[in-house]
Image (cartoon, rainbow, N blue to C red):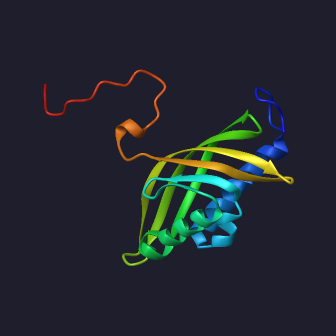
Amino acid sequence: MPDAGSKLSVEDRLDIQELFAKYCWALDLGDADGFVNCFTEDATFNHLWQGQMQGHAAIRRAVQELWYDRHTWWLGRQHLANHYLMTPEGAGVRVKAFFSIVQYNTEYRTNFVFGIGTWDNVCVKQNGTWRFQSVQINAWMDKDKIPWAGERPAPVVRGKS
């Protein structure tokens, strides 16, 4: 593991991107074991509707609740991650990424974008395998949730000349 401020190896970067892929595949296909295996034993998972949970048992319960209490939300869903920023931090790597969630609605046979936002996760390498130590989901539900580095643009007032 490189020290903070140094570059990650290409192999570590690719392994972390594959961790995100394993997370998305398991989440979107209802694979509880595969999903939980993406996390360390003591990981924290902060989800928009369910709040923060810690550890494999809590994460498993939360994802099963999503799949089976809201099954029409999950069947046909794809979580997509991109534009990774990876920064060594402490014993791990902070990984920021954009996400989008697209879905095929099985009842109406239509496709739509369910949501977009950002991730702010910490990954650690355990026994040669990268896992999530923490997952922080920032779904863009309001303009104040959208990250912005510059000065916020003034709101546009429609209908005034």
Q: Is residue 65 left or right of residue 161?
A: right
Count numbered badges in the picture.
0
Q: Residue at the spot x=54%, y=49% of the render?
A: 99
**Residue 149, horizontal then vertical, whole percent:** 49, 25
Q: Is residue 85 left or right of residue 49?
A: right
Instruction: Locate the C terminus and report the quarter of the image it occupies.
Output: top left
**Residue 75, horizontal then vertical, whole percent:** 49, 74
Q: Is residue 28 above or below residue 50?
A: below
Q: Is residue 125 above or below residue 23?
A: above
User: Residue at the top extreme?
Assistant: 151
Q: Is residue 39 above or below residue 28?
A: above
- Front residue of 43/47: it is 43
Instruction: Locate the N terminus and report the quarter of the image it occupies.
Output: top right
Q: Is residue 94 left or right of residue 114?
A: right
- Front residue of 63/146: it is 63
Q: Residue at the spot x=42%, y=72% of the render?
A: 70
User: Residue at the bottom extreme?
Assistant: 107
User: Residue at the left extreme?
Assistant: 160
Classify residue 34 by image quadrant.
bottom right
Q: Residue at the spot x=47%, y=65% of the render?
A: 103
**Residue 137, horizontal then vertical, whole percent:** 52, 49
**Residue 105, horizontal then vertical, whole percent:** 42, 72
Q: Residue at the spot x=63%, y=71% of the render?
A: 32
Classify residue 31 by image quadrant.
bottom right
